[in-house]
Image (cartoon, rainbow, N blue to C red):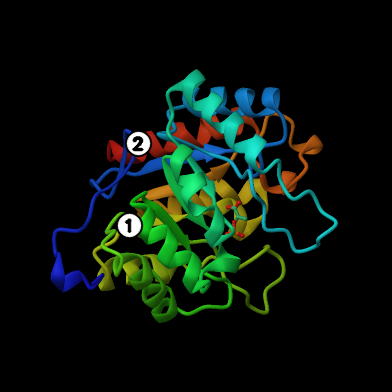
Amino acid sequence: LGRRELRPEGTVVRVGGATVGDGSLNVFAGPCAVENRQQLLDCADVAEHYGAVGLRGGAFKPRTSPYSFQGLKWAGLELLAEARAHTGLPILTEVLDPRHVERVAATADGLQIGARNMQNFELLSEAGKSGRPVVLKRGFGCTVDETLAAAEYILAQGNDQVILCERGIRTFEHATRFTLDISAVALMKQRSHLPVMVDPSHSVGIPALVEPVSLAAAAAGADALLIDVHVAPEQALCDGKQALLPDDFGVLMGKLELLSMGL
Ligand code: PEP
């Protein structure tokens, strides 16, 4: 269902009032995890101030260690709703469990399926049934073909509001957190009519590389970016090391704006 030939003009996905796949490069930004009310509202203000079209933030966090912060869960989702009311930005948040989909979808404007769950087929089907737009992140050990096949699980439920997200894969290179597969961006755009998002933050894991990699993603044809922004990264409970500071996010947004004007 996702093959490009079936819809050569491409699919436009609507996340609340934001559109992805309409020819412009839109940015979803926010903290990796919702940590507390003030942190979220401050980060949401930054995202809104610099022109992000949506707020990202994890209420349910898929952590490698069970002893790491697992997210504020339902309380975090309520805070996201408050941040939406505060900024007007639609909210995009991860859902981890098929049993949670309906309840998360009742609040969130867009559902994120994380890299670790890309082949959780029950979760994909439930997300498809929810009718909400879904950002499907490529598993870091999965091929492009497997990613496109995973998207079919959502599409097969009659939900064509799917955004494919390249977030880096595992390679022998450990200088960056993962290796952003920039060719996959161009390839998925050729093979599928679904819009493609890139997450430079989770792929490189180094704030100083987020800007050049974002610009590369734009050049490769990405429709959207997912950027970690934090007002106090050193205090973050999750992935603080990769988050951009507000000013640096502002600089990146300025450069993306110039790029969109062809400068
Ligand atoms: C995230 O975006 O919060 C996240 C956990 O990313 P990934 O699933 O790509 O690791």
* Residue at position x 59%, y 60% in the image: 203
| Residue toward you, 137 or 70 | 70
Q: Of the residues shown, which amino acid type is indicated by label 2?
A: Gly
| Residue toward you, 25 or 2 | 2
Determine which quarter of the picture holds residue 195.
Answer: bottom left
Q: Position of residue 100 (x, y in %)?
A: 55, 53
Q: Earlier in the sequence, mark 1 or mark 2?
A: 2
Q: Is residue 18 above or below residue 42?
A: below
| Pair 1/2: label in front | 2
Name the secondary structure under disc 1: loop
Q: Is residue 261 left or right of residue 250?
A: left
Res 178 seen here:
yes
Q: Quadrant of ligand 1?
A: bottom right
Q: Is residue 45 left or right of residue 69?
A: left
Q: Is residue 15 left or right of residue 50?
A: left
The residue pinned by badge 2 equals 16
Q: Which mark is residue 52?
A: none
Q: Is residue 21 above or below residue 170?
A: above
The residue pinned by badge 1 equals 221
